[in-house]
Amino acid sequence: MFYKRLTSLLILILFFIIVWYMQGRYLLSNPNLETLIYLNNSASGFNSLMAYAVLYTIPYLLFYRQWFQEESALEMTRYRTREKILKLTWMRMLAVTLIFVLAMLGVHFYMTNLFFEKSVLIEANFVVISMVNSLSLYFFYIIVGLSYVLINTKVRTKTIALFIVFLLFSVEFFAEKQLFSGKFRTLLTEISLFSQYYYQDISLIDLLLKGAFLSLVALVLYSITSLAYSRKDFFGNE
């Protein structure tokens, strides 16, 4: 199990490296402040809304499933109560989401430092905004994971549940882009904070509050999942 988890982590890191380079390769010949800001906008690139909501959703869920296969009939017998299994699932999700976001952050740090001078990163306040952005991303992917667990209580096949979650967040992205476009608060307005910091001049405190909002959404979704979990059929098809 250790080697499978290590392999999945290395594959994830390689995936992030490839995405980062492919998204920014045409701009890296001129690594200045303007280029750095453009590479971190919400419209395109490694930290775009499309990347967060569409491109990274399935890798996140596959990574979660690879590290911690969801509850089984054996676990149901071992832990006796559904409440204990849900708490175990919750703790696993918190841990694997942290690893996922740290892998993303680590690749972004490494690749950016590889191509940009430190003076540019300092001028852009890159380290601080990256950390704040990662906080929001952490709660965002907790919401993605909880959505998967919630849907899996109604859909017996886990693969189908995975694609339903992918479709939900893909539809949210395209609806946000084509219909809402910042007209009111959605999950996607609370992530991709680079653009809001660089282009809209929003303070770091306001950006931290966005992470707090996402954490509240995650807690509400956890409560809803708990209710649905109490009626889950643990002996359904995989």
Image (tube, rainbow, N blue to C red):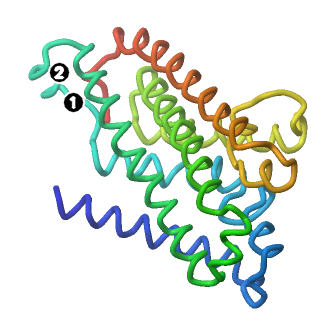
Q: Classify 194 as above or below 71.
A: below
Q: Residues within 10 Å of mark 2 (few under 14, many from 20)?
A: some
Circle 1 SS class: loop
Q: Residues within 10 Å of mark 1 (few under 14, many from 20)?
A: some
Q: Secondary structure at mark 2?
A: helix
User: What label sits on residue 76 in the rendered view?
Assistant: 2
Amino acid type assigned to the residue bearing label 2 in the image = Met
Relative to residue 202, is residue 145 drawn left or right? left
Q: Is residue 80 above or below residue 190?
A: above
Left/right placement of residue 3 relative to residue 182 reads left
Measuring from the top left, give residue 47's x and y in whole percent: 67, 59
Which residue is the extreme one toward the bottom? 29
Q: Horizontal and vertical percent for residue 50?
A: 71, 53
Residue 76 as seen in the image, left or right of residue 152: left
| Mark 1 and mark 2: Cα distance apart in space | 6 Å
Image quadrant assignment for residue 43 = bottom right
Contact check, label 1 and label 2, Cβ < 8 Å: yes
- Determine the residue located farthest toward the left in the rendered image: 78
Residue 202, horizontal then vertical, whole percent: 80, 43
Residue at screen point 77% across, 50% down: 197
Mark number for residue 30?
A: none
Name the quadrant containing residue 211: top right
Residue at 82 percent across and 39 percent down: it is: 176
Report the amino acid beneath label 1.
Answer: Ser
**In the image, residue 128 lies at what x, y percent?**
61, 55
- Residue at horizontal 49%, vertical 26%? 151
The residue at 62%/78% (across/down) is 118
> Quick one: 67 or 127, which is closer to the camera?
127
Using the image, determine if residue 37 lies above or below residue 89.
below
Residue beneath disc 1 = 72
| 6 shown above or below 142 | below
